[in-house]
Image (spheres, rainbow, N blue to C red):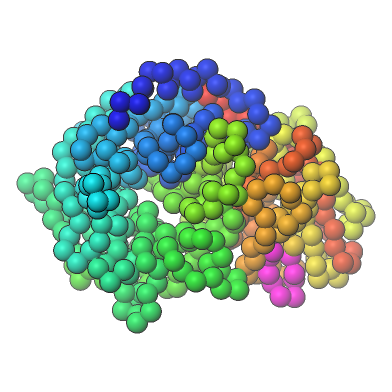
Amino acid sequence: MEQFDVKAINRKIRDNLPFSHRWHNRFHIEMPFGLINDPNGLTFCNGEYHIFYQWNPLGTVHKNKCWAHTATRDFVNYRVPTLAMHPTDEHDKDGCYSGCGFTEGGGLRVLYTCNAKDENGVRTPAQRLGTYDGDVVRKDEIVVPKEEPGYTAHYRDPYVFWRHGQKHFVLGAQTADERGCVVIYRENKNGAWEFLGELKTKMSESAEKFGYMWECPALLRFGEYDVLLCCPQGLPAKDFKYQNAHQSGYFAGHASLDSMEMYHGRFTELDHGFDFYAPQVFTHGGRHIMLGWMGMPDRDVDYPTAEKGWVFALTMPRVLTLRQGHIFAQPVKELRALRIEENAVDIDAQDTQNIAVPLGEGAEILLDLEFGKAQNVDIELVYGLEKTVLHYDKKAQVMIIDRSGMKLGGRGTRKFKLYADEKLALDLFVDRTAIEAFFEHGEEVASFFVFPEKNILPEFVIKSDAPLQSVTGRVWELAAIQFK
């Protein structure tokens, strides 16, 4: 634990900004060195959005889990990140794992999972409160010292929410028979936390296990509806879903904390890309704003930046809305400030089978495709001799993201159902390596990385098997977010 020289680490961060390597992204939060993963402690407090996230400042492997911190008022200008929490004692000596943030008494509190292992590797997960003092997190009392009977030590990732004026938190868990689930605690009038039990779902009643562990849960309210976010691990892949090593998604319905039951629809993925996991949500000003980890557990081989000294990023912030039981996600409107209007290019194609637009180091492409006679459309990002393709099959109503044309990093395909009738709407954000695609006004989303071998700016190309009825839209060059 003595290796965490906070002042030296913070100085090294500042000395390595702004980024210079061609693979470092411009409008996604990254670190100049080390490994980042889950967003943590997302809280609006005293006029700022506070963003903590898992970080290993000592290397690009999943060890030495700390919390980094930044903050922003507008999702464009950010504080220079700092090391806000690191392992210090017998409770979290093996990692400050994921947790949440909330406001209390005008200040910012956190609740996180301490990870400690004995000489035999047996883990003791403890849930601990902390207080952010504007510089670091002061560690406070342990509120849940270990897992409850009937559960394993996979017991982590608390998320605080309120119901009927009382504070609760939901926690990801694994039962003794290795079934994933979530449990809930409630704060009583004396300030102690009571175990309410497991939130029963259709999945817990099924004879077939729905994953062996549910990570990173959150219980949100959308009007009269409840939404349980979670990340089930161990779901078998199917033709059009569950194609990553682990999944991130939600159940929408109604949760009763009296009966500890949730009546809900099917589990739906939040993102169909290769690189999305462990999302967390701010709730402020009538908006649910989500950030996710752009990365994937157990797929480290897919990320060649590790050889350069850093790995992974956070997604752009997205606003979530619920419509007829389905979550739509769209970039926060504040990101429009990154658009460089004087360089914008309007698309109103005459030859709809041959469209090509050169892109800069960062771009947003807002597009409407009217199919006409076309049944198959390819939207390509071309990097010299390399390319990534978003292929839409109108008849099958299937979108395929194909990275097989890239030489470095993760490759392969992801495919999912996308219901577009006569038109396809796309909002595509292309950073240096991080790409986020919002289809049909955010009905479906896909986040993924590409790592061009050569230092070549991409070209945006549209091809189809027959003339499209029309192609209209606009392409903006995007400025970089600023760390100050």
Residue 291 inside the magenta-drawn segment = no
Residue 223 quadrant? bottom left
Work out which residue is located at the far front of the displayed protein and give it.
120
Work out which residue is located at the far left of the displayed protein and give it.
190
| Residue in view at x 25 percent, y 31 percent | 88
Magenta-tinted stretch: 392-401
| Residue in view at x 31 percent, y 68 percent | 178
| Residue in view at x 35 percent, y 26 percent | 3
Work out which residue is located at the far bottom of the displayed protein and give it.
207
Image quadrant occupied by the N terminus: top left
| Residue in view at x 44 percent, y 31 percent | 57
Residue in the foreground of this view, choosing between 15 and 348: 15
Question: Main SS type for the magenta part?
Answer: strand
Q: Is residue 410 visible?
A: yes
Q: Is residue 346 above or below residue 424?
A: above
Residue 87 position in % (x across, y down): 29, 34
- Residue 327 placement, left or right of 448: left
- Residue 76 placement, left or right of 407: left
- Residue 451 placement, left or right of 208: right
Q: Is residue 418 above or below residue 389?
A: below
Residue 55 position in % (x across, y down): 42, 37
Residue 394 inside the magenta-drawn segment = yes
Residue 477 position in % (x across, y down): 72, 35
